[in-house]
Amino acid sequence: MSGPTGAVRIDHLVIADMIAPGSKVLDVGCGDGALLQHLAETKGIDGRGIDLRPAGVKRCVARGLSVDLGDADTDLDDYPSDAFDFVILSQTLQATRNPREVLRSLLRIGRRAVVSFPNFGYWRVRLHLLLRGTMPVTSCLSEPWYSTPNIHLCTIYDFTVLVDELGLAVERSLTVDRRGRISHIARSGGRANLLGEQGVFLLRKDR
Amino acid sequence: MSVSDDHTRLNADSAAIAADSDDSEVRATLAAATPLMLESGASLGPFTVAYQTYGRLDANRGNAVLICHALTGDHHVASSHPITGKPGWWHQMVGPGLPIDTERYFVICANVLGGCMGTTGPKEINPATGAVYGLDFPVITIADMVNAQALLLDHLGIDSLFCVIGGSMGGMQVLQWAASYPERVFAAVPIATAPRHSAQNIAFHEVGRQAIMTDPEWRHGRYLVEGTRPRAGLAVARMAAHITYLSEPALHRKFGRRLQNREKLGYGFEADFQVESYLRHQGSTFVDRFDANSYLYITRAMDYFDLAAAHGGVLSRAFAGTATRFCVVSFTSDWLFPTAENRTIVHALNAVAANVSFVEIETDKGHDAFLLDEPDFVRTLTGFLGSAWAARCRSLGP
């Protein structure tokens, strides 16, 4: 989940582009804190993180980030409403037990949410299943089925349906492919669900 | 090695304070004009606080770190203990180049109110009567200890602490500091602690107190007047408590079922097992450095601690609007102050959107792990203090 220090992951750059400078940000599932660190350095944010893996949390705190050991599925309830300008859920939604509730919590705690996730509708994923008949393993979905933490995979289309159902507004939506090419979902129509390896959405509470 | 107030007057400049900051103990007389109002409704004053400092206070007085000690700890944090001769209880954490870097911070640690290492407690003379306090000493609470420390800071001319840090009962004081004096605490590190003392922990304390109070030498707390010492009772109290500071795996690793100085079972009640011998040694050496009545008073202070109760039953209210940066640390094998207890602090802080880090350190060494050289713990403290210090410097300006 975490890129090597120094090299900034392309999806981090895409997310960072959506975050207003100086804002208060919570990164849910922050891993080793690479994104928080990048946002602190480039956007001067007041950042917090939570992650459920102790090793990553220890690395975060050791590098001076404010991060606590917690679970997106259970611990988001603690936070007061509108406590953050942005809540980020980067490559984590698919690993939660209840993505719908997590998504709802993000937009209770934060005025805006940035959600990125691997697109299960990506053509390579589809082709993998079609031709090989085995669970797809890609650069975004690197673990075999029996050890993957990704228990709630969805396509970009699935995600937009849920966003609609929750009454959330999409401010920006992008796809990023393996070469780092960015496309705007709104402009690419249905093709995004086929061509985008991962989706990145900037969401707002009310339509 | 002067033991005097003269170096630490309010109007003394920082260099004068730093002059005291070798390994010498300092004593201050506090609450001389106005007695300290205690939570119980009693008042106390004037009283003495014995403390140690390490490092130099910056000219802007912004680099003070207050270390709060645990139940049987004292202010000899990083210098050798005057009775046991052992290194300070946190010598691996406090010193030049260490996480609590005395080349950067001005470190203060004071013996708690009710203690027995120089601060006024039940073994000292009651100025009102000229006799030893004994059980006439008022029951004190964690908040009373913290209020006494706040008076010490006033005395030292320190408005705001860079950091308050401590483990176990020290962590309770850290939480109390953050709740009572949020504007005086820039960063707070409660370690292996809880926002209230659990029923199980009160129960263990009661075993210890009963061991002391049923010792015939205790004499209803008048042993110092009557020339006796409840050594056996205090030793048993320590033995029982010491078990709670360790863990089953740590005890097994250290002792297993190995026998002490013998090849086979003795079929009697001598210390057959190494673990028995170890506990007896812990008990008997403890009574040389600790006062039995202090043990009663300080355990009571911990039992009474319930930060939520003092805030309408809602812990987060204790921290409403706090600007303090917190770093909560727990240890996986600590069953006295387990991770779940520490996590309730984190939940409460998140509920007010406070700036909080929370780390659980993996160790099999039990509650005592906070006193030991755990690499992950050291890295956590170094990282947190380093970034908090950078923020402190930004907030204080050039």
Image: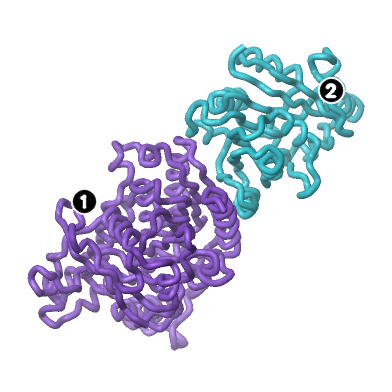
| Residue A14 % position (x, y) | 77, 31
Q: Do labels 2 and 1 share a chain?
A: no
Q: What amino acid is at disc 1?
A: Glu
Name the secondary structure under disc 1.
loop
Q: Is residue A188 above or below residue A114?
A: above
Which residue is painted at 24% across and 64% down in the image? B30
Residue neighbourhood size for the residue with mark 1, other residues' Cα within 10 Å, grouped as few (<14), some (14–19), many (≥20)? some
| Residue A81 % position (x, y) | 49, 26
Report how far apart the C-alphas of labels 2 and 1 lie in the structure: 64 Å
Q: Nearer the viewer, residue A59 or A143?
A: A59
The tint of chain A in the picture is cyan
Q: What amino acid is at disc 2?
A: Ser
Q: Name the residue under label 1.
A: B39
Which residue is painted at 19% across and 73% down in the image? B124
Q: Nearer the viewer, residue A143 or A17?
A: A17
Q: Which of B133 and B47 is in front in this view?
A: B47
Label ID, residue A183: 2
Residue neighbourhood size for the residue with mark 2, other residues' Cα within 10 Å, grouped as few (<14), some (14–19), many (≥20)? some
Chain letter of the residue beneath label 1 in the structure image:
B
Chain letter of the residue beneath label 2 in the structure image:
A
